[in-house]
Image (cartoon, grey):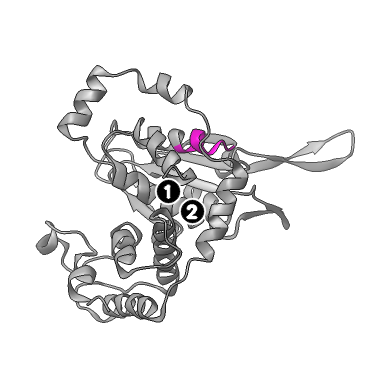
């Protein structure tokens, strides 16, 4: 059935080849009113994915290239003195848009990174005691290179926690890479994309996510996952209540994408790594280097 969600994903799959799971998770993140962090090496399609989603959603789009000399005012904007009216007037920066691509966010200093905190959490920015609301919808997709690369500043925990999901695209499979090598220029294909969802349709889907039902056993399962993370010796600290809310929101969005109005425990499992891996820290990461940080949660907590 060609639902708006299926049309969206089908078109996205023509740009980002062989990564249907990643695209579904990214869409679930945005439908859950979350922000998305994409971490991977250069050249695998992080920025392309963000451009693709912006085109398919038909939203006002701004790309901010993060560099070491970028200042908070370059993102938020600044007040400029108006001689004619004898007062300061606020000139909004690129942050005041529907869809923000914060490209290579970890190449900026922590001070500049923190310029996004209030807008991502509260959908507003306060400057000189005046509060300015963000556009609706307001989406931030940030990309970052691995921390071991030269010229990067690690994102602090408070900033990481503002992202509902963290995803990695990875290398394409052999067949997808063959299509990439033989196919049309990706930028040309992006330019030809039409919006798959209107702004109103997208906002309506976000509202539908809120109404997806989570039964008591599902809530108990999420609580058990949170409790295990807090009590287990595997982790230096457990998942916060905000992380639990993020798991619930993402699971509801995943269920909606699957065409259901209720959540299964399998929906929780599908989104759990993307929601928790950047929030959990292993006590001994070297001994668990072959599995994800969330592996203990998935293997040790029983499905109701």
**Percent position (x, y) of residue 6?**
42, 43
Looking at the rendered image, the quarter that the N terminus falls into is: top left
Residue located 58% across and 40% down the image? 198
- In the rendered view, would you say 82 is above or below 106? above
Magenta stretch: includes residue 55: yes
Magenta span covers which residues?
Answer: 53-59
Is 78 situated left or right of 42 in this image?
right
Q: Look at 39% across and 68% down and name the residue there.
A: 263
Which residue is identified by label 1?
A: 27
10 Å neighbourhood of mark 2: few (<14), some, or many (≥20)? many
Task: Tell me where residue 17 appears, x and y as whole percent.
Answer: 29, 33
Left or right placement of residue 12 versus residue 197 in this view: left
Residue 126 in picture, x, y percent from top left: 67, 55
Q: What's the mark number on residue 31?
A: 2
Main SS class of the magenta portion in the image: helix
- 201 or 29: nearer the viewer: 201
Q: Are marks 1 and 2 in contact (CB under 8 Å)?
A: yes
Q: In this view of the protein, which residue sits in the foreground, 87 or 118?
A: 118
Residue drawn where x is 50% and y is 46% of the image: 140
């Amino acid at each position: 059935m060609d639902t708006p969600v299926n049309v969206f994903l089908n078109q996205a799959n023509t740009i980002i080849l062989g990564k249907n799971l990643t695209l579904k998770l990214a869409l679930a993140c945005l439908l859950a009113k979350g922000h998305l962090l994409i971490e991977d090496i250069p050249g695998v399609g992080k920025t392309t994915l963000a451009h693709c989603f912006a085109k398919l959603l038909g939203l006002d789009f701004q790309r901010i290239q993060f560099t070491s000399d970028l200042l908070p005012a370059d993102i938020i904007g600044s007040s400029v003195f108006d001689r004619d009216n004898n007062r300061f007037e606020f000139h909004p920066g690129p942050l005041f848009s529907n869809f923000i691509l914060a490209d290579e966010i970890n190449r900026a200093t922590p001070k500049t990174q923190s310029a996004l905190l209030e807008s991502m959490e509260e959908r507003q920015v306060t400057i000189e005691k005046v509060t300015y609301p963000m556009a609706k919808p307001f989406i931030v997709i940030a990309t970052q290179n691995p921390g071991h690369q030269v010229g990067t500043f690690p994102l602090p925990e408070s900033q990481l926690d503002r992202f509902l999901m963290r995803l990695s695209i990875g290398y394409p499979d052999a067949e997808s890479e063959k299509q990439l090598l033989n196919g049309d220029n990706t930028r040309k294909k992006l330019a030809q994309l039409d919006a798959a969802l209107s702004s109103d349709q997208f906002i309506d889907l976000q509202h539908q996510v809120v109404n997806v039902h989570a039964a008591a056993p599902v809530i108990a399962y999420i609580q058990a996952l949170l409790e295990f993370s807090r009590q287990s010796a595997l982790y230096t600290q457990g998942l916060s209540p905000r992380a639990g809310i993020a798991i619930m929101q993402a699971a509801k969005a995943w269920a909606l994408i699957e065409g259901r109005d209720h959540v299964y425990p399998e929906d929780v499992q599908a989104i759990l790594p993307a929601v928790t891996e950047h929030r959990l820290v292993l006590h001994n990461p070297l001994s668990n280097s072959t599995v994800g940080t969330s592996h203990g949660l998935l293997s040790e907590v029983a499905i109701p």
